[in-house]
Every structure is written in structure tokens, then in C-alpha cells.
Image (cartoon, helix red, strand yellow):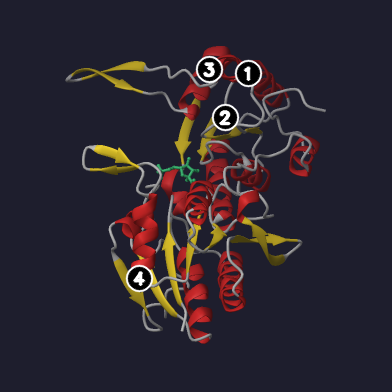
Amino acid sequence: TKCVGILTSGGDCPGLNAAIRGVAKSAMANGSRVVGFLDGFRGLVENRTMVLEDRNVSGILTNGGTILGTSRDKPRKMPMGDQILDVTDIAVANAQRNHIDCLVCLGGNGTQKNAMDLCKKGLNVITLPKTIDNDVAETDITFGFDTAIEIATDAIDKLHTTATSHHRVIVCEIMGNKAGWLTLGAGIAGGADVILIPELPYKIESIVDHLLARRRHQKRFSIVAVAEGALSKKESDEIKENGKKKKKKKTYMDDDGTYLVEETTSTKIARKITQACGIDTRVTRLGHVQRGGSPSASDRLLCTRLGTKVGQLLAEGVYNVMVGVKNNKCVPVDLEKVAGITRKVPSDHEWIKTALLVDTNLGCELK
Ligand code: F6P
């Protein structure tokens, strides 16, 4: 019998349990033994395991989070005591110690890279694309994205009613540090008036002009959907010049004295809007709500399809691939083509054209 290892790594999202169940059930159906490693690559390095049997993976399809736990730790650079060490060899040795024929890693871009590191050291791996950011290469979609877009769209709907009543601008910050898929998708689905994503640096003047034009047309409220990683044109030019973002800290006074709070992307945009035109503005940061709760039907279906495809590949002995979705089919793609790449929204993407056609401001002049 083969022995399959499985771990979940990086930020959690709805659908991880559904995918674990899909992998485990289909691997067991082929007679394999399944061992879970706890808390991502950290558990592999510390040899913390959980044997997965049918009873462990029953009844978890609809549950959010991950029964295995997760962490952002990478074998290449792992905090161990007061040191940061490359423990890739320990990770591989522990997989061998547990007689693992193949390690299945469920995660986003960081995870793909970590899996590639282990693969280079001779361990067989298969990965699945998990992230609410939808920014993994070589797949049309990642799991977790559909659920998150539902949550963010629902939030925008709710913000609409209160923004309308008070004739306010509400800036809604949506997750996505490097890629704007979630903000753009939820922004279009929720009918946001302004959508700002990391791929399209914004100019505050463009946003304010749009908000004032709406007022002139008797639309006294507006929703600004902003990705947490959205950048102004100036910030983006600075990064191009210096290679990295300069962190600006803003000081606030508290009852106890002075303390530092970093301005968030959304509070900064709200401040700039009010400074430029005086419109009453409020901020909502959706935060980890977007990664919580039960997966959507579409994510449950996707995770079960992806997970069981892993089971098939294990039976065939196809390793060192990520299972992606292409033209609605689950297909293995070379892990090498995936690791280390962030799939960003291309500026000529259909969703961008769509947003423009319904008079959405994207913070910049785009035709
Ligand atoms: O990668 C998923 C994600 O939710 C990003 O959208 C976000 O930038 C990041 O994780 C937040 O990470 P953490 O949960 O570690 O604060």
C-alpha cells in the first residue's frame, strides 16, 4: 500500500476541509494510507501527525477552516527558537520517516514554492491551488475564491443601503495584497462605483472627479471597493524606482499618550477623499470574515473535484504537479510552471472592460 501525506499551509479559507476529504477518500479507495501533518510545513518539520481514516474525514465537507491547522511557515526559512533556519532536509527526512510516497500540499503561492523546494530535494509532491486571492498561475480559478467573492459582494450590498440613506461615501477594503481579482469581482458583482486594485495604480483626482460627477447626477452615495494592496500612482512609481514600498507611519494620540498606527489603504483613501472634496466618508475593512465560514456550493464542488483528481494521480503515480482547472477540467500542470509566480489581473482583462462599460471608476484613465 502507498502512504500519502497531506498538509494545509498559508492563510486558511473555506474549502480546505472539502479538499482534504476529497484527497483522503479517493486515496483510501485506492488502498492508500493517509497521514495528515499538522499546522502546515511546521508540523512536517516537527513531525506532528494525525492519521486520517474514514471517520476523520466524514462530516467535514461543509466546515470552514482546516482540521489539520495551518501556518505560514516555510521550510526554507523557518523560525526555530531564536534562529531562522533552512530545515528543508528535516522536512524531507520526516516525510521519509513516515514512509510517505507523496506529500499533498494544499495552499497558495507560498505553498507552491515550498512544495517545489521539497520536490527539488527528491520528495514526490502534488499540490492544489487554494486562496481567496485567485492569484495562482496555471489555473483558471483557485478554491476559496468563490466563497470569498460571495462574502465580499454581500458586504457591498449591505453597505449600499446604509450609504444611500446617509448620502455617504463608504470605502470597503477587500483582501488581496498583490492581486485584485477578489476586489474587482466583488466590486462588479456588488455594483461598486469605484474599484481600486493593485494592478492599476490610482490617482485620487480621478476618484474624486467620479464621486462629484455622481453627486451632480443626484447620486449622493458611492461605494469605493479597494483592495488592501491598492497603490497610488506616486507609490507605484516609487516602488518602480526603489524596488520596495516605503512604509509611512501616521501618529495618533491616545488617552495614554502617543502611539503609532499605520494607516490602512482604506483609511488613507477615505481621508484623501474627504480632504479633496469634503464628502462624509466611512470605512469598512472586511478582513478575515472573507476567509471564514462554510464554503459555497461551487467551492465544495471544486474542492471535491480537485481532491479526487489528486487521488487519481496518486494511483497513476503522477507526481510533482499542481492540479489546476483549465477550461473547466481538472488537469495536472508542472509544478515548476506554478511556483514563484503571482497571477495578476492583466490590464486588458475582460472584467476590467466590463467594469468600465458600467461606468465604474478604476482610479485611472483606461479606455
Ligand atoms: O493570501 C490570503 C490572504 O487573505 C490575503 O488576501 C491577505 O493579504 C493575507 O492572506 C492576510 O494574511 P494573514 O491572515 O496572515 O493576516
In the image, what residue occupies the spot 56% across and 47% down? 133
Label 4 crowding class (10 Å Cα cut-off): few <14, some 14-19, many 20+?
A: some
Of label 1 and label 3, which has the lower sequence position?
1
In the image, what residue occupies the spot 66% across and 34% down? 193
CB atoms of marks 2 and 1 within 8 Å: no
Q: Which marked residue is nearer to the observer: mark 3 or mark 4?
A: 4
Residue that carries the numbered disc 2 in the rendered image: 230
**Residue 261 visible in the snapshot:** yes
Of label 4 and label 2, which has the lower sequence position?
4
Q: SS of the residue at dot 3?
A: helix
Distance from mark 2 CB to nearest ligand 1 atom below 8 Å: no
Residue that carries the numbered disc 3 in the rendered image: 272
Residue that carries the numbered disc 4 in the rendered image: 98
Q: Which marked residue is nearer to the observer: mark 4 or mark 2?
A: 4
C-alpha separation, residue under disc 3 versus residue under disc 2 = 14 Å
Of label 4 and label 1, which has the lower sequence position?
4
Q: Is residue 158 above or below residue 22?
A: above
Label 2 crowding class (10 Å Cα cut-off): few <14, some 14-19, many 20+?
A: many
Identify residue type, mark 3.
Lys
Label 3 crowding class (10 Å Cα cut-off): few <14, some 14-19, many 20+?
A: some
CB atoms of marks 4 and 1 within 8 Å: no
